[in-house]
Image (cartoon, rainbow, N blue to C red):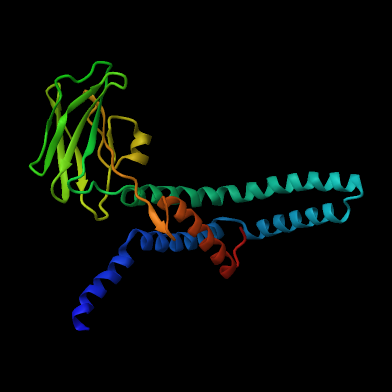
Amino acid sequence: MASHAPANAAFNLSLLTGPLAIVVIVSLVVGLLMVVLFGYTSDQKAIGIAKNQLKAHLLAVRLYRDQIPVVMGSYGKILRGTGRYLKLAFKPLVYVAIPITLLIVQIDRYLGATPIPPSVPFLLTVHPTGGDPLNDATLRLPSEITMSAPPVHVPSTNEIVWRLIGSKEGEYELKIVAGGDSVAKTVCVGSDLPRISTVRLRGHFWERVFSSAEPALPENSPIESISINYPDRNIEIAGYGMNWIWLFFILSMIAGFAFKELLGIQI
């Protein structure tokens, strides 16, 4: 029995630190924070009054449905009440949405894609900045990364594609030399939860904020972007795989409504 203890401990630790456990824990925490932040940044009394008025107008529509003037008046009051409620909820929703969006972007660096498995080919794609292809571009690789096929120039999309293979787990730097300049792109090989950047970009500030975890390419670089086709990560739930963001939204909404009732916060 004692010989199985380390294996059981390692198994339990892997469950607690696996993608599914991380999503569940983050969803519960975010659900609580959403409700608390909404409660502190909103006028709870005014929201409660607006919701009660909407319920009263909806009840009037059901009770007096055979009296057209009353029903039409109630519909008008419902529209005005809905606008009043949305106005009260808008500022708190902005306060909630901005930090959660930034949090999702950061978590997606770890859970959005999986590292390249060892001995499995992957593609490195380079887009030049201008219309001319980078015919003189060369690739410098560490010893753990090898080229499995010659580079392919794709005129229709103006790009160069290399097919590579990693022989050992780790984080490596691939260097592309073009026009006398050298730029690098990081690749993660393995099976853990490293911070992954699928693309490195020149300029495109907002696109970099949401899709890249690496510094911008130099402004004078002849390269517009460097990307790697990492596999998407799916989290298995009852035999069905889904992207972590969908699972996060479902669980955080459920947690948010549960905490709303527990804390008595009007939403």
Does residue 1 lie above or below 178 as drawn?
Answer: below
The picture quadrant where one finds residue 122 is top left
Does residue 177 lie above or below 15 as drawn?
Answer: above
Residue lying furthest top in this view? Answer: 132
Residue lying furthest bottom in this view? Answer: 1
What count of labels does the image hold? 0
144 lies left or right of 241: left
The residue positioned 10% from the left and 44% from the top of the image is 144
Does residue 59 lie above or below 221 as drawn?
Answer: below
Please state which of residues 59 and 89 is positioned toward the viewer in this rendering.
59
Please state which of residues 70 and 84 is positioned toward the viewer in this rendering.
70
Residue lying furthest front in this view? Answer: 239
Where's the N terminus, which quadrant? bottom left
x%, y% of residue 170? 16, 50
The picture quadrant where one finds residue 165 is top left
The residue positioned 40% from the left and 59% from the top of the image is 23
The picture quadrant where one finds residue 226 is top left
232 lies left or right of 59: left
The residue positioned 15% from the left and 24% from the top of the image is 137
x%, y% of residue 247? 45, 55
Where's the C terminus, which quadrant? bottom right
The residue positioned 13% from the left and 35% from the top of the image is 147
x%, y% of residue 4? 22, 78
x%, y% of residue 233? 34, 49
Please state which of residues 138 and 155 is positioned toward the viewer in this rendering.
155
Residue lying furthest right in this view? Answer: 67
